[in-house]
Image (cartoon, rainbow, N blue to C red):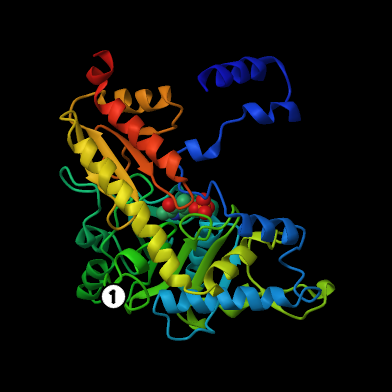
Amino acid sequence: MSNQADQLNQRRSGERWAIDWLPYLTDSTRNVGSYTTAVVSPELARIAERLGGHNLVNNSEYPYIADMVADCADWLSRLWHREDHHAPYVAVSGSTEAAMLAGLAALHRWKRTGAGERPNLVASSGAHVCWKRFCTYWDVELRTVEAPGDTVVADPAALARACDEHTILAVATLGYPEHGLFDDVAALAAALRDQGRETPLHVDAASGGFTAPFLSASLPWDFIVPAVVSISASGHKFGQTSLGLGWTLWRDAEHCPQHLWHGADYIGNGKRDIGLTFSRSLAPVAQQAHLFTRAGAFDRYRYDLRDCSSLTATIAAALRGDPDLKVLNDGHAIPVVAFVDRQTGAVERFTSRMGEDGWIVPTYPLECNPRLGQCGRIVVKPGLSTPARDRLMASVLRAIRPQALRL
Ligand SMILES: *Cc1c(COP(=O)(O)O)cnc(C)c1O
């Protein structure tokens, strides 16, 4: 494994990409830091092969496209307790575009109030970089709040205090990318209410939107919380589709101004659409529609996630046995194990030992709380084969107990 990677790296310096590199490229299932789908079932691969050349915007040529998207929105409405299944929804390229659209809808809505001040957006400092992009690109002030003390999730009251009458959105993150833990949406909504302002709340549920409904069904985080005006999520994370799918659902039409929806008459369907991109592959949407409409769809998501969660629990238990590491997330709400240093350098030591076995495990300073040391994470995704899981677990045990190797 590492020899092949070395060979490839040597070639990279002098040669251009060529198709004969394919056998040497990294197997994406080895990247256990990534949230995005690495392998799909043969069924989903067949859908991608058959429909990958259909352009999502050509929904008059392929009338079933609108049905597929509407079906998915209908299922997401059920999952996320949205009463009006016909309220605005959109399938886009990923959570980043989904977040941009939620932000733009909120910005345009705020502008209608005629407020002359600079608008702002409030989020945890551990929120995804897409919010930084949104604020930079559209000149909105980003107000971030760090987690207090040695915690890793922002205090809802502190987030609410950062809001004022020019806050276009307070953003809660369901599944901090760094460690997978959730902002407390209900507590944030209550803190905003206590301030007497109706600050709109968006939930960036890129990863959690497809895990919380199955693993923590009683957690109030979605449209059940009245302050939540929009939710975004990635189909290509725990939604289990191939890369290239994100969703935004708005509570009602009032929160997604009509003037943002444009028609494109030359494709001949008279439909209006919202998005930052135009042509895209139908494949991931068709996969999502298949995953939602197959028999026992929700039970199968629940089964897959519980299965992943039981492996994260085992990994977390093993990591707890290493006195130099502290486990932040054992993966019960989302199959992510995250850990920080108790002893400087411990996370890096662990991840580099995992690297010796060919696993890519990222190491990074925590933006949600820069006072803590390095963090690492392992994301267990559905689709990891049983032998791969066994090898992953064996590598974890080896990485935390190097002395066992020396015997
Ligand atoms: C992954 C992620 C994003 C970005 O999602 P893409 O689908 O990769 O664009 C945004 N927010 C959170 C919380 C994420 O985890």
Q: Would you call the spot at circle 1 few (<14 residues within 10 Å), some (14-19), or many (20 or more)?
A: few
Pick the residue in front: 208 or 148: 208
Pick the residue in front: 396 or 277: 396
Secondary structure of residue under mark 1:
loop
In the image, residue 323 sits, relative to residue 43, either above or below, namely: above
x and y percent of residue 213 in the render?
Answer: 36, 69
Query: Which of the image's four quarters has the C terminus?
Result: top left
Determine the residue positioned at 47% across, 37% down: 31
Tell me the kind of residue under disc 1. Arg
Q: Which residue is mark 1?
A: 197
Tell me the quarter of the picture where residue 283 sits: bottom right
Tell me the quarter of the picture where residue 374 sits: top left
* Lateral position of residue 55 relative to residue 92, left or right: right
Pick the residue in front: 405 or 370: 405
Q: Is residue 46 visible?
A: yes
Determine the residue positioned at 84% across, 72% down: 266
| Badge count | 1
In the image, residue 277 sits, relative to residue 197, either above or below, namely: above
x and y percent of residue 375 in the render?
Answer: 30, 36
x and y percent of residue 146 in the render?
Answer: 26, 47
* Lateral position of residue 156 relative to residue 175, left or right: left
Q: Is residue 117 visible?
A: no
Determine the residue positioned at 24% across, 20% down: 404
In the image, residue 18 sits, relative to residue 206, either above or below, namely: above
* Lateral position of residue 272 relative to residue 155, left or right: right
Determine the residue positioned at 57% across, 31% down: 26
Indicate yes or no: mark 1 CB to ligand 1 under 8 Å.
no
